Image (cartoon, grey):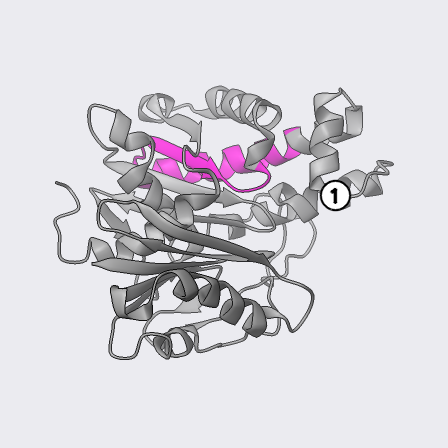
Amino acid sequence: MTVLAVDIGGTKFAAAAVAPDGEMLARAEVPLRGPGSADRTLSEVVGRITERVPPARLDGIGVGSAGPLDPGRGTVSPVNIPAWREFPLVDTLGEVLPGRPVRLAGDGQCMALGEWWRGLSEDGAARSRAMLGMVVSTGVGGGFVLDGVPYVGPTGNAGHIGHITVDPGGEPCPCGGVGCVETIASGPGMVRWAAANGWTGEDARALAADARAGHPTATLAFRRAAGALATAVLTASALFDLDHVVIGGGVAAAGPILFDPLRQAIERNAGLGFLRRLRVDPTSLGRDAGLFGAAALVLLQDDDPGT
């Protein structure tokens, strides 16, 4: 069984053909090119894979998408893609491989599952029993793998950790809430705050470079983001007794300027003993974690994921 995996993000779409052993036979990535480009981008990125791996060789489709989403109806409404509201993603992809299964989950849920299946946990003595995967990029998403099974919740939207309120007096979030983690820790949120406080750079990548160089406003932007993420991580850990948190995405790629203050904030605020055993790591799979997780939605469906 070879699976077409699709990863729908806020700024780019990616797709891959993934074999049962996790080998990635083909991979493609296409950036979104402005409002209204999502339909075209989806068709392009999937087409790049089916040109290299014929549809006859593909046994199903796994897709992870920014949310919210409705797995029952197969629709998605990504916060950062306004043109897609209740977009019929499952039906649209189903036209690529008629008669074969299409399985949908959140992008954060797929990132977590991909990391559990093919990432850090493979190298340890045992896979994590309770893991949170987070994507910190244009938005902030997440997903849980509990005892080897993705926990998606009754509506399929469990793991929206970016929309935990951490600053009740903060700025409005596109989701409709106020002071969400995403408003502080996402790339655009960090850049917006830094610009309002005198920073003159262009984007999150430039902000990270300035933070590494010791620019005080850029450094503080990353510390604010780390504090918001630490609050969310500890909240989730207190609820689910997590033993491992894995973080990926463009902002997380900044490395120690984010992870050092994040770990410090968690250590400082983890009062209960079971919270202090929590491990926090950057993803070992980089930009491919979500693709591996999307593939696993199909490849692991008939397996016992704990084996």
Say which of 165 and 39 sits in front.
39
Callout 1: helix, strand or loop? Answer: loop
The answer to whether residue 164 is magenta is no
Q: Which residue is mark 1?
A: 203
100 left or right of 293 in image: left
* Bounds of the magenta segment: 223-251
Q: Quadrant of the C terminus?
A: top left
Q: Name the spot of residue 2 as percent of width and height, x first.
A: 25, 58
Q: Name the spot of residue 72 as percent of width and height, x first.
A: 32, 74
Q: Name the spot of residue 76 as percent of width and height, x first.
A: 46, 70
Q: Name the spot of residue 15 as percent of width and height, x first.
A: 44, 57
182 left or right of 303 in image: right
Say which of 257 and 18 sits in front.
18
Vertical placement of 207 versus 42: above or below?
A: above
57 left or right of 133 in image: left
Taking the spot 50% from the left edge, 63% from the top edge, the residue there is 45
Say which of 289 and 193 sits in front.
289
Q: Quadrant of the N terminus?
A: bottom left
Identity, as a three-letter code, of the amino acid under mark 1:
Asp
Task: Note whether residue 159 is visible.
Answer: no
Task: Note whether residue 202 is visible.
Answer: yes
Vertical placement of 170 versus 258: above or below?
A: below
At label 1, counting other C-alpha atoms closer than 10 Å, the crowd grade (few under 14, some 14-19, many 20 or more) is some
